[in-house]
Image: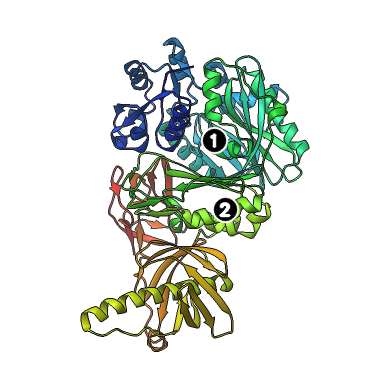
Amino acid sequence: MFDKILIANRGEIACRVIKTARKMGIKTVAVYSDADRHALHVQMADEAIHIGPPPANQSYIVIDKVMAAIRESGAQAVHPGYGFLSENKLFAEALEKAEVAFIGPPATAIEAMGDKITSKKLAQEAGVSTVPGYMGLIEDADEAVKISGEIGYPVMIKASAGGGGKGMRIAWNDEEAREGFQSSKNEAANSFGDDRIFIEKFVTQPRHIEIQVLADSHGNCIYLGERECSIQRRNQKVIEEAPSPFLDEATRKAMGEQACALARAVGYASAGTVEFIVDGQKNFYFLEMNTRLQVEHPVTELITGIDLVEQMIRVAAGEKLSITQDDVKLNGWAMESRLYAEDPYRNFLPSIGRLTRYRPPAESAHEAAVVRNDTGVYEGGEISMYYDPMIAKLCTWAPTRAGAIEEMRTALDAFEVEGIGHNLPFLSAVMDHPRFCSGEITTAFIAEEYPEGFEGVTLPRDELRRVAAAAAAMFRVAEIRRARISGTMDNHERTVGTDWVVVAQGERFELTIDADRQGSTIRFAEGDTHRVTSDWTPGQSLARIEIDGDPLVLKVGKSPNGFRIRTRGADMRVAVYTPRQAELAALMPEKLPPDTSKLLLCPMPGLIVKIDVEEGQEVQEGQALCTVEAMKMENILRAERKGIVTKINAGPGDSLAVDDVIMEFE
C-alpha cells in the first residue's frame, strides 16, 4: 500500500479523498493555486505545494506543474478527483512514465472511454444501444447547422472532452445550433484544452440514470446499482439519488451487466460510471462513460456501505476486489443536493464573494438516518470566479425514499449560508415539489416546472400558520427581553401584551399568546390552537422549534417589527404587530422598485467576452446583445424587447460586478 498520495485537484473532492486516505493511514499532498492558498484542502493535507496562478489552465491542468509537485513531494500515487486532469490520458501516461501510480483507470481506457466520440463508437461495436448522432468532428458552425438538420431537432451539442455540464448546449433550430456550437467550443477550450465538438439527437422526456462500476486489474468487474440524476439545470446535475425510483430489478440488472461488459471490453480498472438515457418504457441508451469518480458518488456509498475512494486506492495498489457481485446489497435510500454559489432568483447565475456565514447541519449517522456534507469551504473563505460554483454536497440517507427526502428537507432548512447567492431555497422547493416526491421526474423537470425561472416559494396557508405561530412566540420572547432592558434604564418595566397580528406573504393572522415556562399556546382568531416550544433566544440565527410536537427549522434574521425568516425554500419578511400597529401598517404605501427597463444590467460578476451590437442600432426581442463569462460558463444576454441602443458602457475584456450597466436603450 502507498505511504503518500498527491491529490491533483481542489475543493470538496480533494477534502473527500484526504478523509479516506487519513482513515487508511496514508499521508496526503495538496496542490494549490494563488486563489486557493488558504483553501480547506490545503489546510487538511499533510503537505501542500503551490502550482501557479488562479486560472486552471495556468495551474491545475498544467501537467508539467503537477508532475513537478509530485517529484517534490515524493508521492507514490496520484488521485485526480474529477474534472481537471482526471480524464486526461497524457497525464496518466506521464505518471506511468514516472513510475507513479494513477488512482484511476489505465491510459488506454481513458483514451477509449473518456473521449465521448470514441466511447460511443466502441459502444456501438459492442452492441450497446446508443443515441443517434454524428460521431465525426465538426469543423465550423455551418457544418454544425447542416448536421443538426440531418439528425433532426432538437439536438445536443457536446464537447468531446467535456464533463460537469461544460461545453453542452441544446439546440431547437438553426440559430441555436450556430450559437451553441461556438459557445460549446469556447467553453470546451477554456475548461479542457480540447475544443472538439460532436452532435447527437436530444431525446425528449428522458431520465438520466447511471451505473456505478468497480473493476480491478485482475479481470474482476462489478456494478454497485444505479443513481438517478434527472434533476438537472443547463445539463448540470443538481439533485441525485440512489437507487432510482423508476427502475425495476430486471432493468437494473440489464443495465449493470451491460455497463460491466463495456468496462471489460476496454480493460477498465478503478471506479467508473456508465451513463444512460432511459425512456418512459425503460428502454435505455448508452450516453457516455466517465472514467473517474463521479461528483454524486456519496449516494452510492450510502446505500452500499462501500467507500469508493478506498476501493480506487486499493485497485491502484494492485489489489484484487474483495467484493463480488453477490456481496452488493442496496440498503435504503440516499439523496444528494448540490449547493452551488449561484443566485436562483437571477436565473441561477454564478455568485462570488466571501462566505460571511457557513454553518452546515451537523453530520450524523445512526440506524434511522444519516446526514453527510462533503465540502471544500469554510466560514470566512472566498468563493472564487475561477472555478466551478459547487461548494458542498449535502447528502441524507433513510430506510425509505420518503424518509430520505424528509431528512433532506430538515438538513436544508438548517444549512446557513450568507455572503453569496446560493441555491438552498431552490433545493428546498424541489424537495417539497409533488412531482419530485412522486418520483415522476425527467431531465426536463426544472424547465417544465420552473419555465419562468425560480421566484421563491409561497408556503401553503397551513404551513404559513405554523411559521406565524413560531414568529409570534419568538417575537414575544424578544419583546420581554427588550422590556426588561428598558425597565432597568427607566425604573419601570414595559408590559408585553398577549394579542398580536402576524403578516407574512400577504396573509394576516390574528392571534393570542398564552405563555408558560415550558412554551406558548397560540390561539388563532379563526379557532386553531398550536403549542409552540423552543429554546431559541434573541440573536440566534437558527431556530429549532416544535409546533404541536412536529419540528420546524427556521433561519432567522433581523427585520423591523419582526423577522426575516427562511424555511422550506421561502424567504419572507414576517411582521409581528400589536393590533394598533397592524391598523397603521395597513395604511403605509408600498415601496416600488426602481425602473431598469431601459438598461441592460450585468446579472452576475463576470467578464465581457463579446459585444454583439453598436450604439444607435435597433435591436429586436430575443436578439443577442453580449456574452458574459463567469465560472467557466458563457452566458448570452438577449434583448427583452424591441429598442434602440443609445449607449454602451462596457467592452470585451471588462470585468463587471452584479448590476453594473452594460448598455442603455432609448
Mark 1: secondary structure: strand
Judged from the image, the secondary structure of the residue bearing numbered disc 2 is helix
Amino acid type of the residue tagged 1 in the rendering: Lys
Identify the residue at image location x=36%, y=51%: 613
Residue 220 coordinates in the image, percent (x, y): 66, 19
Q: Mark 1 sits on what residue? A: 158
Q: Residue at x 54, y 20 (%)?
A: 314
**Crowding near the residue tagged with mark 1, few <14, some 14–19, many ≥20 C-alpha atoms within 10 Å:** many
Q: In this view, does 141 lie above or below 530?
A: above
Q: Are marks 1 and 2 in contact (CB under 8 Å)?
A: no
Quadrant of res 267? top right
Q: Nearer the viewer, residue 647 or 498?
A: 498
Q: Can residue 175 be seen in this view?
A: no
Q: Is residue 378 above or below residue 644?
A: above
Q: Is residue 590 visible?
A: yes
Which disc is residue 407 wearing?
2
Q: Position of residue 196 (x, y in %)?
A: 50, 29
